[in-house]
Image: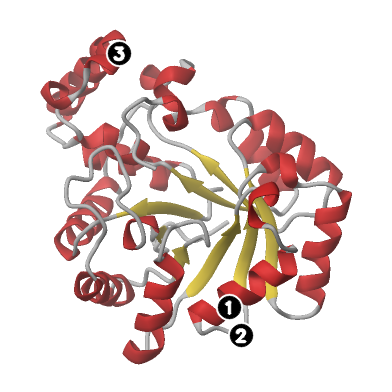
Amino acid sequence: MKNSNTMKLALGTVQFGLDYGISNDGGQVAIEEVKKILHIAQQNEIDTLDTGCAYGTCETVLGNVLPKQDFMFNVIDKIPDIETIGKTIGQTLEHSLTKLHLDCLEGLLLHNAADLTDGTYQQLSDLKTQGLVKKIGVSVYHPNQAFELAERYDLDLIQLPLNLFDQRFIQTGCIKWLKERNVEIHARSLFLQGLLLMRTTQLSDYFTPYKDLFERLDRYCESLNITRQQAALTMAHQQRSVDKFVIGVCSQLQLEQVIEAYEKARSIDFELDPFSCHEEALISPFLWPEKKQ
């Protein structure tokens, strides 16, 4: 188990290549701001970047910034839906490595869990044997996907959604089960793509059925004299079996605020259970009509 003082935040980079996120009003992050964000990340021992070849110009942006600034990060990349790429996994990886100016990735994940078959697993394993990637795995949306795939294949890394509202992977025992199998776990959507940080008055009509949940969260945070951001980040300290929590920011200031809230969250005794929700319409961003692609 990791030391409780270990920096568990990883930096999601989709905003570097796309106008992405329900709470993102600034659009794609400018390259000069990307440099500032990465500088702050490295200063604070954030050592992992999460990217993907489907994230617009993200790989190219990182490839232009990382070598010139002498940044040292572990890069996790994702292969999009196999049907959409029109090439082999190996060819896709080679293209990504070229854009990133890297010889090897820390990890390579299939973005679509349905794409993990005997054939694609063999392709991933071959790339690992060749030394082009250190870890192979998959991104999942539901606990049953993680149970099934980690039982069938020898996976190094699984990325899954986890936040105050979406606690399915805790409640099903999936996180504990994966850790017992020595699978590295990266959690995404800690802020539910920014939804958890939006004021109730900012929410669109789509989220009206869940207004009571947001208001209950606000009352609980007020009783503890903490912010919603600090509340969300308590998950990173309570769930010690999760190795990394991937967060996305659009500015240096946002990252500095997240890091400050992360440190404050260490000492917060926050009860998670009352805020668990199983409504897919809330906890699955791909179902949101407003979600930016």
To which residue does mark 1 refer? 97
Residue 281 is left or right of residue 131, and the answer is left
Q: Please identify the quarter of the rendering in which residue 15 is found.
A: bottom left
Could you tell me which residue is drawn at 26 percent across and 70 percent down?
34
Q: Are the two marked residues, 2 and 3, in contact with CB atoms closer than 8 angstroms?
A: no
Nearer-the-camera pick, 192 or 4: 192
To which residue does mark 3 refer? 210
Q: Residue furthest front?
A: 86
Could you tell me which residue is drawn at 58 percent across and 58 percent down?
78
- Which image quarter is the N terminus in? bottom right
Mark 3 neighbour class, 10 Å CA radius: few under 14, some 14 to 19, many 20 or more: some
Q: Which mark is residue 76?
A: none
Between marks 2 and 1 in the image, the one whose residue lies nearer the viewer: 1
Query: Residue 287: image x %, image y %?
Result: 45, 25
To which residue does mark 2 refer? 103
Say what secondary structure mark 1 lies in.
helix
